[in-house]
Image (cartoon, rainbow, N blue to C red):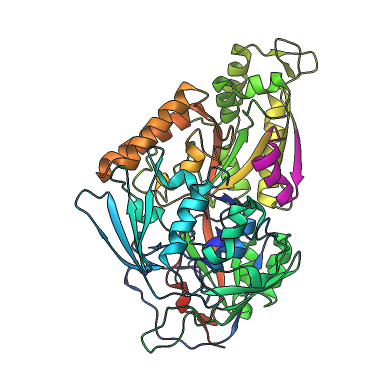
Amino acid sequence: MKEFIKNLLITFGVILLFFLPFHLIKPSNSKNEYPIKTLDIRNLEPTIGVEGGELKRSLSADAKTLNPVMAQETSSTAIIGLLFNGLTKTNVKTLLPEPDLAEKWEVNKDGTVWIFHLRDAKWFDGKPVSADDVVFTYNQIYYNPNIPSSAKDVLTVEGKPFKVEKVDDKTVKFTLPKPFAVFLNAVSQPILPKHVLEKSVKEGKFPSTWTVNTDPKQIIGTGPYRLVKYVQGQYVIYERNPYYWEKDEKGQELPYIVSIKSQIIKDPDVSLVKFLSGESDIYGVRATDLSKLLENAKKGDYTIYNLGATPSTLFLFFNQNPKAPIEKYKLKWFQNTKFRQAISYAVDREGIKNIVYNGLATPIYTAVTPANKRLYDENYYPKYPYNLQKAKEILLSIGFKEGKDGYLYDSEGHKLSFTLITNAGNKEREAIGNILKEDLRKIGIEVNFQGLDFNNLVSKLMSSYDYEAVIIVLTGSMDPYFSQNVWLSSGHMHMWNPKQQKPATDWEAEVDRLFNLAAVELDQNKRDELYKQAFKIIGEQQPMIFIVAPQEMVAVRNKLKNVFPTVWGWYKDEYVYIKE
């Protein structure tokens, strides 16, 4: 059941997030028998469970691909995250790496040579996992210049790849150009089967391999579940991988739950109804759902878990890509730091927190949230408190003038107007868009606000770049390094202007420099300081106008046992079992 909850609510540590988590709520003093529950998992461990049963859950959208290397959005990773493993994985209790496909490893004194010993794992088709698969995955896929992979951004040190070599059938050697602070976390990327995919790589067809129309039997991984059936727009069915290696202390196979059915439900209100009626077992709680869920908790026999601050950030950003199909005069606006700062002052973060999230969010001004305890500092990063007058003054200072109709116009006579998009059906994001539209109208800005189908929105962001402004959410990561595909100017997910050949601005070059230094800095305090400097620059430049960090709650049927949810995923989720 590897990371399925995290993928459901999400990660790729840095994949787009289209679910909304929530703020810490203290249980009321009423005699409610079903208060919101908080968990301190530091001293909790799962008990021995029983095998069997089907987990019912829901997903908000169809996948765009079933290829884990090509997946860049949670609609895809939420469906395929169960199917694959990396050499390592992260223990969400300790936040430290632990064995996955590699059962152990050794490292030399200076941290530049790592030897991994593979466990006796098998692919879904019964063939053994070998060193050839690992070498193939890294050298022919992740480091292949003809395969556009976000993973490539986190599998380099100062822009240089790892040297990956086979020692024997079950042993792989990684040689690094320099010591690398988060190397063990970096090699959690999915390992793929050479015997299945080598032909498509050699023929240059890998990016279009394993599409949503592929027969599920052809999707070969090592994960705890394998895909049985996928009917687009309806449901996904999984069954437990009979070759999965993990067992409990009694020798029972893990995961305990033998099948999963995920309904694809695009309307979150329908998802709520399905959960309340018992048709799903897990539900990511929106702020607007809370009263309804508390009202029905006893009858529904579920518990609402408060997971606290999430690393996810909600923000608005403008398209600064010179290759984008938008008007050049608008590109000039969007590339102006003062323009973006003005818009930031016009964002009523406190109002959005209270109106949209019922107080269940934290206002933010850069990419750091309270979940990032080492980096979060309210007094360190620049702030842009809600001030419409100041916002307008800044716009006037950079050459905009007020017309007779009350709207602002640039020096060439173009009305200050742009189209703002988000994913349709997300009530919170739609509410935020309407609040922004009304507040910006007060200072002479015309906003055309639209909701788009999820996959259409992702295509605009990642492929055609045909957009002007977007409201969206990014997942955070346990270490900023794993957000490099967002923050490096060359990154595939460098939202406002991706895949730059060289930094478009001096400040982006400086962020690159700080991130590259942090990647090889082994002293944690010094690494943190480098990242804080980078995020301070991002806060000053406002390429992404951060609004709030929603905070997370999840409702879970009480029949599910060994339930230990956190904002980073569920602790030992393979031990979750069903007790009717």
- In the rendered image, residue 39, in percent from the top left (x then y), is placed at 41, 68
The quarter of the image holding the C terminus is bottom right
Q: Residue at x 76, y 64 (%)?
A: 233
Please tell me which residue lies in front, 233 or 412: 233
- In the rendered image, residue 536, in percent from the top left (x then y), is placed at 41, 32
Please tell me which residue lies in front, 213 or 246: 213
Magenta residues? 448-468
Please tell me which residue lies in front, 385 or 239: 239
Left-right relation of 343 to 480: right
- In the rendered image, residue 108, in percent from the top left (x then y), is placed at 22, 54
Left-right relation of 136 to 160: right
Looking at the image, residue 416 lies above or below residue 287: above
Please tell me which residue lies in front, 165 or 486: 165
Q: Is residue 369 visible?
A: no
Q: Is residue 246 visible?
A: yes
Q: Residue at x 28, y 52 (%)?
A: 113
Q: Residue at x 42, y 35 (%)?
A: 535
Left-right relation of 333 to 82: right
Looking at the image, residue 142 lies above or below residue 121: above
Looking at the image, residue 215 lies above or below residue 418: below
